[in-house]
Image (cartoon, helix red, strand yellow):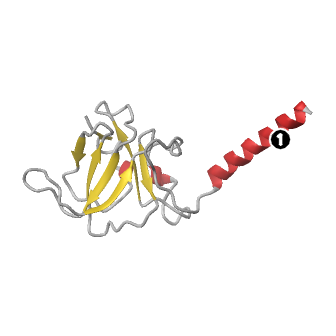
Amino acid sequence: MKRILKIVIFFAFASIAIYSCSHVSGTYVSSNGSMAGSSMKDNCMDCHQKGATQGGFTVAGTLFQSDSITRYPNGYVELYSQPPDSLGKLGDTVVAKIEVDGIGNFYTTHSIDLSQGVYPRVTSSQGYRRSMEGVVTNGSCNSCHGVSTANIHVY
């Protein structure tokens, strides 16, 4: 009886793992404290891209601490429609706000229009902020950050 119970438990967990890895349809949005993005590394959109999977990410990346190695969980990313003014203050129009999960990843499958460009700002769970100086028209943040430019980090 004990052996049967172990087999049933094993197959239950195996089914959950298989379903979790293969089930890609639906809406996915990172949230503070969530550990759902724990398997993500490098460029999130290498796997989670429009056309490659149902529910591909429109915006995704990873937030790091100032050492660019240690992940920074539970912050958020805001996308603004206007550039910063001469004092670095971003406009009031927030296009999207995406929470950073419990291990430092942020992602969403929600439709976000990036065609006109957005101006990203990351905020850590401690309230530290950092804004990108340029306009972005691509939501695949880790396709540049950590490759040709520094990781996304806050102090």
Q: Name the spot of residue 118 as percent of width and height, x first.
A: 26, 61
In the rendered image, the quadrant that contains the N terminus is: top right
In the rendered image, the quadrant that contains the C terminus is: top left
**Would residue 7 appear left or right of 128 to someone viewing this image?**
right
Mark 1 packing: few (<14 Cα in 10 Å), some, or many (20+)? Answer: few
Tally the marks: 1
**Dot 1: element:** helix
**In the image, is residue 146 above or below residue 22?**
above
**Would residue 102 appear left or right of 116 to someone viewing this image?**
right
Q: Examine the image and state in which quarter residue 96 appears.
A: bottom left
**Would residue 26 appear left or right of 128 to someone viewing this image?**
right
Q: Examine the image and state in which quarter residue 74 appears.
A: top left
- 28 or 66: which is nearer to us? 28
Q: Name the spot of residue 42 as percent of width and height, x first.
A: 44, 44
The residue lying at 64 percent from left, 54 percent from top is: 22
Taking the view exactly as shown, the residue that stands out farthest to the right is: 1
Residue holding disc 1 = 8
**Residue type at mark 1?**
Val
The residue lying at 34 percent from left, 56 percent from top is: 97
Q: Name the spot of residue 59 as percent of width and height, x first.
A: 39, 57
Taking the view exactly as shown, the residue that stands out farthest to the left is: 86
The residue lying at 84 percent from left, 38 percent from top is: 7
**Would residue 116 appear left or right of 46 to someone viewing this image?**
left
